[in-house]
Structure formats: structure tokens, C-alpha cells
Image: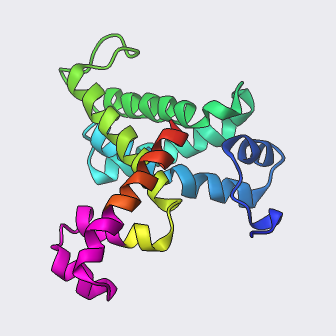
């Protein structure tokens, strides 16, 4: 059992600690949401890596300046998503934008909305995977991300080939439950 000090803080606890100027909490917040911010800029808005890094920096600065205005700390992820989207749109306006950028910034075009939904889904899966036991993370990563065959997975994990399918099935049940818990 983990000690209270080792427990992973909820978003609400993290916000409270950040508001109290806890540097460790700020580091954790950026580690927790950094890839989400970057992926939103990169994939959701089609920015280059350099542009996404600029949007990342602008977003983090805005988070630092405006965290005190967040009314419901449980909505931290959605709030970060809005700040990132606003920073990306501002970046596009400053650098010529795109012809298809909608006039109403609160209504993204269909392609952008689909890309943002994929980023959200990928982030949710990644967060859920992080909470799974090591054996589940390994087998799911090997099968789905690395697209390896059962025989290769069995050899890598030093388990019977017949165990691979049952482990994948068991771990998918756990992953679905973790995703449902986060939604």
C-alpha cells in the first residue's frame, strides 16, 4: 500500500497545491498534461513541431498566470484544452492562419473537431494505461502499439503463447474499466 505522500494527487488536489505555489505540483501538472497540450497543438491544429512548442510555452505561461481563475478544479483538463486551443488559434492568426480557420473561434471546423477528439481519446487511453499493472501495460503495448504477433509477445514476456490471448483479453477489460472511470 502506498503512503499518503506517494499517492498520485487528483486534479483538484494538484490545483490547490499549485495555487499554494508548490513547485513540485507545477512540475507534476506539466508532466501530467504536457503531452496533451503538445498533441492538441500538433495534431488538433496541424502545427509544426516548432509551432507546437511555441503554443506549449504560451499555454503553460497562461496556466501559470490564470490558474487562480479556474472555478472548478475537477474541470482542469477541459480548461487546459480550451487554453491550448486559444493559444493555437492566436498563433495561427499571428502567422497568417489558414483559410479554413472558422470565423467563430468557439466552433471548430469538422476536421479540427475530429482531430481534437482523437487527441482527447488518445490522452484518455494513455492515462488509463498508466494506471494498469505492469504486465497489462507490457502485453497491450506489444500487441496494439508495436503490433507484434502472439509468438513474439510470448517469447518477449517469457510466457506460454496460449497465455498471451487470455492476458490481452483480461487487460482489455481492465483498460475499459479504467477508461470508463476517467470519463
Q: Position of residue 71 (x, y in %)?
A: 72, 24
Q: Is residue 155 magenta?
A: yes
Residue 139 quadrant: bottom left
* In the foreground, 48 or 124: 124
Q: Residue at x 81, y 65 (%)?
A: 5
Q: Is residue 137 above or below residue 88?
A: below
Tell me if I can see residue 97 in this picture: no
The furthest residue to the top? 104
Q: Is residue 41 above or below residue 21?
A: above
Q: Position of residue 119 (x, y in %)?
A: 35, 41
Q: Residue at x 41, y 67 (%)?
A: 137
Majority secondary structure in the magenta region? helix
* In the foreground, 64 or 25: 25
Q: Residue at x 19, y 81 (%)?
A: 152
Q: Residue at x 22, y 80 (%)?
A: 161
Asked if residue 78 lies left or right of residue 124, the reply is right
Q: Position of residue 9 (x, y in %)?
A: 71, 53
Q: Is residue 30 above or below residue 62?
A: below
Q: Is residue 42 magenta?
A: no
Q: Quadrant of the N terminus?
A: bottom right
Tell me if I can see residue 144 in this picture: yes
Residue 141 quadrant: bottom left
Q: Position of residue 52 (x, y in %)?
A: 36, 47
* In the foreground, 17 or 151: 151
* In the foreground, 176 or 56: 176
Residue 144 quadrant: bottom left
Q: Is residue 64 above or below residue 154?
A: above
Asked if residue 27 lies left or right of residue 94, the reply is right
Asked if residue 176 lies left or right of residue 11, the reply is left
The magenta-colored residue range is 139-168
Amino acid at each position: 500500500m502506498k503512503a499518503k505522500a506517494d499517492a498520485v494527487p487528483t486534479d483538484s488536489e494538484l490545483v490547490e497545491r499549485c495555487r499554494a505555489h508548490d513547485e513540485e505540483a507545477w512540475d507534476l501538472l506539466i508532466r501530467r498534461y504536457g503531452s496533451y497540450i503538445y498533441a492538441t497543438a500538433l495534431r488538433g491544429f496541424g502545427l509544426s513541431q516548432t509551432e507546437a512548442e511555441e503554443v506549449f510555452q504560451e499555454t503553460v505561461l497562461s496556466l501559470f498566470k490564470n490558474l487562480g481563475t479556474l472555478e472548478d478544479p475537477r474541470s482542469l483538463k477541459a480548461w487546459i484544452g480550451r487554453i491550448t486551443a486559444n493559444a493555437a488559434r492566436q498563433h495561427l492568426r499571428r502567422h497568417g492562419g489558414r483559410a479554413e480557420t472558422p470565423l467563430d473561434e468557439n466552433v471548430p471546423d469538422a476536421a479540427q473537431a475530429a482531430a481534437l477528439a482523437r487527441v482527447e481519446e488518445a490522452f484518455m487511453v494513455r492515462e488509463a494505461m498508466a494506471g494498469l499493472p505492469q504486465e497489462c501495460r507490457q502485453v497491450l503495448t506489444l500487441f496494439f502499439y508495436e503490433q507484434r504477433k502472439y509468438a513474439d509477445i510470448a517469447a518477449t514476456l517469457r510466457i506460454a503463447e496460449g497465455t498471451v490471448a487470455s492476458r490481452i483479453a483480461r487487460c482489455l477489460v481492465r483498460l475499459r474499466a479504467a477508461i470508463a472511470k476517467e470519463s
